[in-house]
Amino acid sequence: MPPARRRGSRQDNDLEEVYTLFNVDPPENFSGHSMSVSDVVVEGRTAFFCDSIGFKEIPFQPELANNVVQSPTIQVVLVEPGKLARIAEIGTTLDAMQQTVGGDIEAYYPFEEQVCIVCNEEGKINGLPLNRAIRDEDTGDIADIIAGTFFICDCSGESFGSLFTEQQKRYLEKYHLPERFFRTRNGIESVQYKPQNRER
Protein backbone atom coordinates (compact mmCIF):
# COMPACT_ATOMS: atom_id res chain seq x y z
CA MET A 1 0.00 0.00 0.00
CA PRO A 2 1.44 3.44 -0.87
CA PRO A 3 2.16 5.96 1.87
CA ALA A 4 -0.69 8.05 3.25
CA ARG A 5 -0.79 11.61 1.97
CA ARG A 6 0.72 14.30 4.18
CA ARG A 7 -0.70 17.78 4.70
CA GLY A 8 2.25 20.06 5.38
CA SER A 9 4.50 18.19 7.81
CA ARG A 10 1.93 16.17 9.78
CA GLN A 11 0.22 12.86 9.12
CA ASP A 12 -3.28 13.14 7.65
CA ASN A 13 -5.82 11.75 10.16
CA ASP A 14 -8.93 12.62 8.12
CA LEU A 15 -10.51 9.28 7.14
CA GLU A 16 -12.69 10.90 4.52
CA GLU A 17 -9.68 12.37 2.73
CA VAL A 18 -7.81 9.06 3.01
CA TYR A 19 -10.83 7.26 1.53
CA THR A 20 -10.81 9.72 -1.35
CA LEU A 21 -7.07 9.22 -1.82
CA PHE A 22 -7.34 5.42 -2.15
CA ASN A 23 -10.75 5.05 -3.81
CA VAL A 24 -11.68 8.20 -5.74
CA ASP A 25 -8.35 9.74 -6.68
CA PRO A 26 -5.76 6.97 -6.14
CA PRO A 27 -2.03 7.39 -6.85
CA GLU A 28 -0.85 6.30 -10.29
CA ASN A 29 -0.46 2.50 -10.66
CA PHE A 30 -2.25 1.90 -7.34
CA SER A 31 -4.41 -1.24 -7.41
CA GLY A 32 -5.04 -1.88 -3.71
CA HIS A 33 -8.30 -2.57 -1.93
CA SER A 34 -10.67 -0.10 -0.27
CA MET A 35 -9.51 1.33 3.04
CA SER A 36 -11.43 -0.07 5.98
CA VAL A 37 -11.25 -0.29 9.74
CA SER A 38 -8.30 -2.48 10.85
CA ASP A 39 -6.19 -1.70 7.75
CA VAL A 40 -2.60 -0.64 8.33
CA VAL A 41 -0.94 2.13 6.31
CA VAL A 42 2.86 2.03 6.15
CA GLU A 43 5.03 5.06 5.46
CA GLY A 44 8.75 4.46 5.61
CA ARG A 45 9.44 2.92 9.03
CA THR A 46 6.16 4.14 10.52
CA ALA A 47 2.84 2.29 10.50
CA PHE A 48 -0.63 3.61 11.25
CA PHE A 49 -3.62 1.47 12.30
CA CYS A 50 -6.95 2.57 10.87
CA ASP A 51 -9.72 2.64 13.48
CA SER A 52 -13.20 4.14 13.36
CA ILE A 53 -12.05 7.72 14.01
CA GLY A 54 -8.62 8.02 12.42
CA PHE A 55 -5.12 6.58 12.45
CA LYS A 56 -3.12 5.46 15.47
CA GLU A 57 0.63 5.04 15.15
CA ILE A 58 1.79 1.49 15.89
CA PRO A 59 5.24 -0.17 16.12
CA PHE A 60 6.52 -1.53 12.84
CA GLN A 61 9.76 -3.28 11.86
CA PRO A 62 9.89 -3.52 8.06
CA GLU A 63 12.92 -5.82 8.16
CA LEU A 64 10.69 -8.48 9.71
CA ALA A 65 7.91 -8.10 7.15
CA ASN A 66 9.58 -10.44 4.68
CA ASN A 67 9.18 -13.26 7.19
CA VAL A 68 5.39 -13.01 6.92
CA VAL A 69 5.15 -14.40 3.42
CA GLN A 70 2.52 -16.97 2.57
CA SER A 71 4.16 -20.33 2.00
CA PRO A 72 3.50 -21.84 -1.45
CA THR A 73 2.19 -25.00 0.26
CA ILE A 74 0.63 -25.96 3.59
CA GLN A 75 0.37 -29.26 5.46
CA VAL A 76 -3.21 -30.38 6.04
CA VAL A 77 -5.23 -33.45 6.88
CA LEU A 78 -6.76 -34.55 3.56
CA VAL A 79 -9.99 -36.55 3.81
CA GLU A 80 -11.31 -38.30 0.69
CA PRO A 81 -14.49 -40.39 0.39
CA GLY A 82 -13.83 -44.11 0.82
CA LYS A 83 -10.17 -43.61 1.75
CA LEU A 84 -8.08 -43.32 4.88
CA ALA A 85 -7.41 -39.73 5.92
CA ARG A 86 -3.80 -38.68 5.37
CA ILE A 87 -1.36 -35.82 5.84
CA ALA A 88 -0.92 -33.97 2.55
CA GLU A 89 0.82 -30.89 1.23
CA ILE A 90 -1.37 -28.67 -0.91
CA GLY A 91 -0.87 -25.38 -2.73
CA THR A 92 -2.08 -22.14 -1.16
CA THR A 93 -3.44 -20.56 -4.33
CA LEU A 94 -7.20 -20.49 -4.83
CA ASP A 95 -6.82 -22.64 -7.94
CA ALA A 96 -4.80 -25.28 -6.05
CA MET A 97 -7.36 -25.48 -3.24
CA GLN A 98 -10.24 -25.69 -5.71
CA GLN A 99 -8.50 -28.55 -7.50
CA THR A 100 -8.08 -30.34 -4.17
CA VAL A 101 -11.80 -30.28 -3.35
CA GLY A 102 -13.03 -30.42 -6.95
CA GLY A 103 -14.80 -27.06 -7.13
CA ASP A 104 -15.44 -23.78 -5.37
CA ILE A 105 -14.20 -23.85 -1.80
CA GLU A 106 -16.14 -23.18 1.38
CA ALA A 107 -14.70 -22.88 4.89
CA TYR A 108 -16.64 -24.61 7.66
CA TYR A 109 -15.87 -23.96 11.34
CA PRO A 110 -17.25 -26.78 13.53
CA PHE A 111 -14.34 -26.82 16.00
CA GLU A 112 -13.67 -24.73 19.10
CA GLU A 113 -10.03 -24.12 18.13
CA GLN A 114 -9.00 -22.02 15.13
CA VAL A 115 -9.02 -24.92 12.70
CA CYS A 116 -11.48 -25.28 9.84
CA ILE A 117 -12.73 -27.70 7.22
CA VAL A 118 -12.32 -26.54 3.62
CA CYS A 119 -14.72 -28.39 1.35
CA ASN A 120 -16.56 -28.15 -1.96
CA GLU A 121 -19.21 -25.46 -1.61
CA GLU A 122 -21.67 -27.37 -3.81
CA GLY A 123 -20.68 -30.90 -2.85
CA LYS A 124 -24.17 -31.98 -1.80
CA ILE A 125 -25.95 -30.09 -4.59
CA ASN A 126 -23.71 -31.73 -7.19
CA GLY A 127 -24.21 -35.21 -5.70
CA LEU A 128 -20.62 -35.82 -4.62
CA PRO A 129 -20.19 -38.98 -2.52
CA LEU A 130 -20.83 -38.54 1.21
CA ASN A 131 -17.52 -38.46 3.01
CA ARG A 132 -17.48 -37.97 6.81
CA ALA A 133 -20.01 -37.04 9.46
CA ILE A 134 -19.36 -33.94 11.55
CA ARG A 135 -20.59 -34.67 15.04
CA ASP A 136 -21.67 -32.41 17.86
CA GLU A 137 -18.74 -32.40 20.30
CA ASP A 138 -21.10 -32.56 23.30
CA THR A 139 -23.73 -35.07 22.22
CA GLY A 140 -21.94 -37.05 19.51
CA ASP A 141 -24.96 -36.64 17.22
CA ILE A 142 -24.45 -36.01 13.52
CA ALA A 143 -24.57 -32.25 12.95
CA ASP A 144 -23.65 -32.34 9.26
CA ILE A 145 -22.19 -34.57 6.57
CA ILE A 146 -19.46 -33.38 4.22
CA ALA A 147 -19.85 -34.47 0.60
CA GLY A 148 -16.73 -34.80 -1.49
CA THR A 149 -13.08 -34.37 -0.61
CA PHE A 150 -12.16 -31.88 2.10
CA PHE A 151 -9.10 -30.83 4.04
CA ILE A 152 -8.54 -29.56 7.56
CA CYS A 153 -6.18 -26.64 8.09
CA ASP A 154 -5.29 -23.77 10.40
CA CYS A 155 -7.48 -20.68 10.04
CA SER A 156 -6.06 -18.42 12.75
CA GLY A 157 -4.51 -15.96 10.28
CA GLU A 158 -5.61 -14.01 7.23
CA SER A 159 -5.07 -17.07 5.03
CA PHE A 160 -5.22 -20.82 5.53
CA GLY A 161 -2.12 -22.32 7.15
CA SER A 162 -0.49 -25.60 8.14
CA LEU A 163 -1.69 -27.59 11.10
CA PHE A 164 0.70 -28.08 14.00
CA THR A 165 2.01 -31.64 14.45
CA GLU A 166 -0.29 -32.26 17.42
CA GLN A 167 -3.30 -31.02 15.42
CA GLN A 168 -2.35 -33.23 12.48
CA LYS A 169 -2.31 -36.29 14.73
CA ARG A 170 -5.61 -35.40 16.40
CA TYR A 171 -7.61 -34.78 13.21
CA LEU A 172 -5.95 -37.65 11.39
CA GLU A 173 -7.21 -39.95 14.14
CA LYS A 174 -10.64 -38.30 14.28
CA TYR A 175 -11.34 -38.79 10.56
CA HIS A 176 -8.99 -41.69 9.85
CA LEU A 177 -11.51 -44.29 8.67
CA PRO A 178 -14.05 -43.72 5.89
CA GLU A 179 -17.77 -43.94 6.73
CA ARG A 180 -20.87 -45.45 5.21
CA PHE A 181 -24.21 -43.73 5.75
CA PHE A 182 -27.67 -45.27 6.11
CA ARG A 183 -31.13 -44.10 7.07
CA THR A 184 -32.85 -45.30 10.27
CA ARG A 185 -36.06 -44.44 12.07
CA ASN A 186 -34.08 -41.90 14.07
CA GLY A 187 -32.45 -40.26 11.08
CA ILE A 188 -29.17 -40.78 9.28
CA GLU A 189 -26.46 -42.85 10.96
CA SER A 190 -22.92 -43.74 9.91
CA VAL A 191 -20.48 -46.57 10.48
CA GLN A 192 -16.75 -46.56 9.96
CA TYR A 193 -15.11 -49.24 7.86
CA LYS A 194 -11.64 -50.28 6.80
CA PRO A 195 -11.17 -49.78 3.05
CA GLN A 196 -9.74 -52.46 0.80
CA ASN A 197 -6.07 -52.08 -0.15
CA ARG A 198 -6.93 -50.66 -3.57
CA GLU A 199 -9.02 -47.91 -1.96
CA ARG A 200 -6.35 -46.64 0.44
Image (tube, helix red, strand yellow):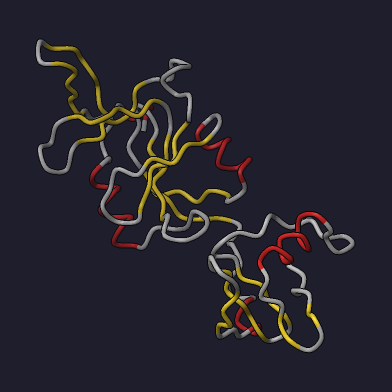
Residue 69 located left or right of residue 125? right
For residue 29, above or below residue 200? below
Residue 80 spot, x, y in % from top left: 39, 33
In the rendered image, the vertical position of residue 183 relative to residue 36, given as above or below: above
Q: Residue at x 35, y 29 (%)?
A: 146
x 47%, y 61%: residue: 157
In the image: residue 120, left or right of residue 5 = left
Q: Where does the image place residue 111, in percent across and percent down from the top left?
A: 28, 48
**Quadrant (top left/top right/bottom left/bottom right) for the N terminus:** bottom right
Say how many tags the image has.
0
x, y percent for residue 171? 28, 49
Q: Quadrant of residue 142?
A: top left
User: Which residue appears at 77% of the width and 70% of the height?
Assistant: 2
Image quadrant in which you'd find residue 33: bottom right
Pick the residue in front: 75 or 161.
Answer: 161
Tell me where residue 168 appears, x and y as whole percent.
33, 55
Give the answer, above or below, for where 104 lies relative to 128: below
* Most distant residue in the bottom direction: 9
Where the C terminus falls, by quadrant?
Answer: top left
